[in-house]
Image (cartoon, rainbow, N blue to C red):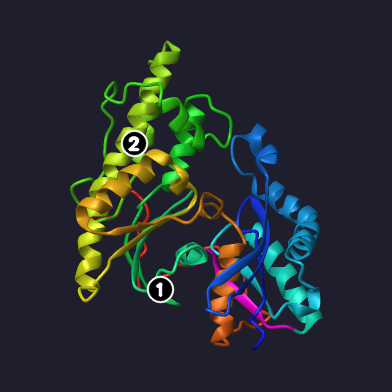
Amino acid sequence: MSKKPIILGIESSCDETAASIITESEQGLPIILSNIVSSQVEVHKEFGGVVPELAARSHIEKIDWITERAIKDSNVNFREIDAIASTAGPGLIVCLTVGLSFGKTLALSLNKPFIAVNHLEGHALSPKLNSRIKYPYLLLLISGGHTQFLSVEGLGKYKRLGTTIDDALGEAFDKTAKILGIEFPGGPQIEILAANGNSNRYELPKPILNKGGCNLSFAGLKTAILRVAKTIQTEQDRFDLAASFQKTIEEILKKKTKIAFEEFKKRNHKNKINHFVIAGGVAANKKIRDMLKNLCKKENFYPVFPTKELCGDNAAMIAMVGLEKFKIKEFSKLDHPAIPRWSLDENAIFLKGAGVKL
């Protein structure tokens, strides 16, 4: 019986300090031995958003003991680790540098291979941690920093089908929550408020809904929320606005996902089963999950959601990419830089801002 690889993953791209140990079964399926995530919510709450310098300082203070705990919980000895995988981008450069430098130092001291990981690739491969999904599959990545449709066609093989041209969806949730007076991070609380509201009360814009393929835009919606919020007089008004926002997001995602389904099927017409993966922190929103599940049923796609623990930023998904790259000996040099902007599809056109023509 050959020894199965053991990978240490490290994540510090934004405001979570995380470390994870994974290996694989005799059947080649990944096994999470530990997955430790330390949030910085209390650090940033008073500022209403992530402060990069404070986030980096918190990473420096925590990364030692977070990694030690991950190793302890996994019952693995330091010397048994076969490779160290660290997030190298995209993200906040002052935060990325902490985890990247820590991972490189460990790799050097243990004389083990180092693997620099694209954070988005971690999300792209996260469903492999709890399902037997095979390539190709369609991915909708919806988080605080990213909103993209990607055709995942193999390790390192990604085709971007659509992206936001301004705000990420998670950012739109958090900013709406802030306008409604909800403490950071308020995005997850929107769904709770919305449950008590009338979703038909306010008519909100759906930017580029009928153009731009499966590209998305949320900046205009956020501006509309700000305008309507100034008219709020009662708690019920607040509930109604949250419900109207939630409904508008669902309608935008439904329309754009249907377009993405068609684009994906054109690229992968030989598929017998079409899988649709929804990952990222916003994928934990139950109303969005239910809407997408129903859409998949109608459009003959099979929905795959990582567990809620694996939807947000975590190191298990980074270790997953590390495991896949370790098996094909795709290692990184110790001078690999932090890359704050790092696209999975390097051939995709950069889209950002109101001046973009769609």
Q: Residue at x 70, y 54 (%)?
A: 56
Q: Position of residue 45 (x, y in %)?
A: 65, 35
Residue 330 seen in the current view: no
Q: Secondary structure at mark 1?
A: loop
Q: Residue at x 67, y 63 (%)?
A: 20
Mark 1 and mark 2: Cα distance apart in space: 29 Å
| Frontmost residue, 137 versus 60 | 137
In the rendered image, the quadrant that contains the N terminus is: bottom right
- Which residue is most to the top? 233
The segment highlighted magenta reads: 112-121
Question: Measured along the vertical axis of the image, is residue 290 above or below residue 122?
Answer: above
Q: Position of residue 139 (x, y in %)?
A: 37, 61
**Residue 83, picture quadrant:** bottom right
Amino acid, disc 2: Leu
Left or right, residue 102 beside residue 246:
right
Residue 293 seen in the current view: yes
- Marker disc for residue 221: 2
Q: How many marks?
A: 2
In the rendered image, the quadrant that contains the C terminus is: bottom left
Question: Measured along the vertical axis of the image, is residue 299 above or below residue 115?
Answer: above
Residue position for label 1: 346
Amino acid, disc 1: Glu
| Frontmost residue, 110 versus 229 | 110
Q: Earlier in the sequence, mark 1 or mark 2?
A: 2
Label 1 neighbourhood size at 10 Å, few (<14), some (14-19), many (20+)? few
Label 2 neighbourhood size at 10 Å, few (<14), some (14-19), many (20+)? some
Per the image, is 290 magenta? Answer: no
**Residue 203, picture quadrant:** top left
Q: Residue at x 53, y 73 (%)?
A: 29
Q: Position of residue 254 (x, y in %)?
A: 26, 46
